[in-house]
Image (tube, rainbow, N blue to C red):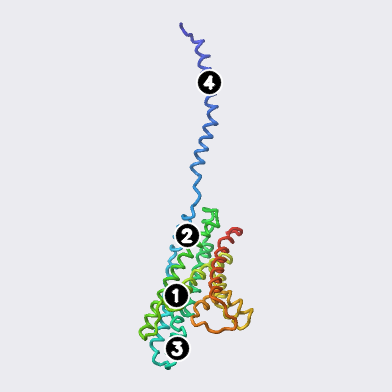
Amino acid sequence: MTITSDGAAPDRAAATATATATATATAPATAVATAKVDLVQVTEPRARFRDLVAAEWIKLWSLRSNTWAFVVGALAVIGFNVGTAWDTYRYWTAQDARSRADFVRDGIPLSIAFTANAAMILMLALSAIGATAVVGEYRTGMIRTTFTAVPARRSVMAAKVCVVTAVTTVFGAVVAAASFGLTQAVLSARHIGVPIDHPGALRVVVASALLAPVSALLGMALGTLIRHSAATMTANVVILLLLPLVFSADRHWAAVVDHALPTGAWIRLVDADQQAVAYPWTLTGAWTVYAVWALAAAAVAVTSVQRRDQ
């Protein structure tokens, strides 16, 4: 059969209409599929906590000032302790016989192992490092970038708390152990050094070591609340140094405040000869003060960012 030109035109029109209808029908499905592909491509997995910890670790050590702060702080603390031991060694013969006989019994070797001046330097240095870990990011604006990339603010601050706590705990342990070992080595030249198993020696080392993370966490909490370097450092000095001087242990209410401060807890823990005071308190109470300050400071640092703008 022969197809004329008049019959071919309707067939071609029908085919064209069919193709157009098919394309129109499949267009929405294609658009939906493309949108799904684009959605899959732009959606990123939620940050894992260990990734946040790794990021905070990098940020902590990316600043040279932090490294120098740890090095200089360690040398200053150890230097004060060893210097006190050296003075004792040098002028040992100038002491009277009774003082030399009661030297070890009165716990003086342990007081030299970690002196009050060294503890003061440790608290100031570590509280400054803890504050800088937070205030530095607010000053540079990096905290905004961090919270934009990771909206879970509490997770970010929890990771920061974990990193600072771990680093400062190791730092405190190294400094306290080195101070004890070096000071007792110097004193042993006069046969007045004590070993680590001497009554109260291990407690002095542990209490001095844990003073580092407690101070750092306090600095972090104050930095999160205040967010200004000068004001945060001032608050650190007031809580760690000035308040213990204002609230003495002569009156009951003042003694209660003094016992509730980190400095007062450290003094009680390193008191080897248990000097008589008007209102004594227990070692358990001093350890509890350590724990409460650390936990409370960590909680403030983690939770306070949730309700405040960057």
Q: Is mark 4 on a helix, strand or loop?
A: helix
Disc 1 marks a residue whose amino acid type is: Leu
Q: Which mark is residue 56?
A: 2
Residue bearing mark 4:
18
The correct choice, above or below, for 291 with respect to 84 in the image is above
Say which amino acid is labelled 4. Thr
Q: Position of residue 211 (x, y in %)?
A: 49, 72
Residue 102: mark in rendering: 3
| Kind of residue indicated by mark 3 | Asp
Element on which disc 3 rests: loop
Q: Residue furthest left?
A: 189
Q: Which amino acid does label 2 sit on?
A: Glu
Q: Decide: few, some or many residues near mark 1? Use Cα within 10 Å; few <14, some 14-19, many ≥20.
A: some
Nearest to the observer: residue 253 or residue 71:
253
Badge 3 vs badge 1, beta-carbon distance below 8 Å: no
With 96 as the anchor, is 29 left or right in this view?
right
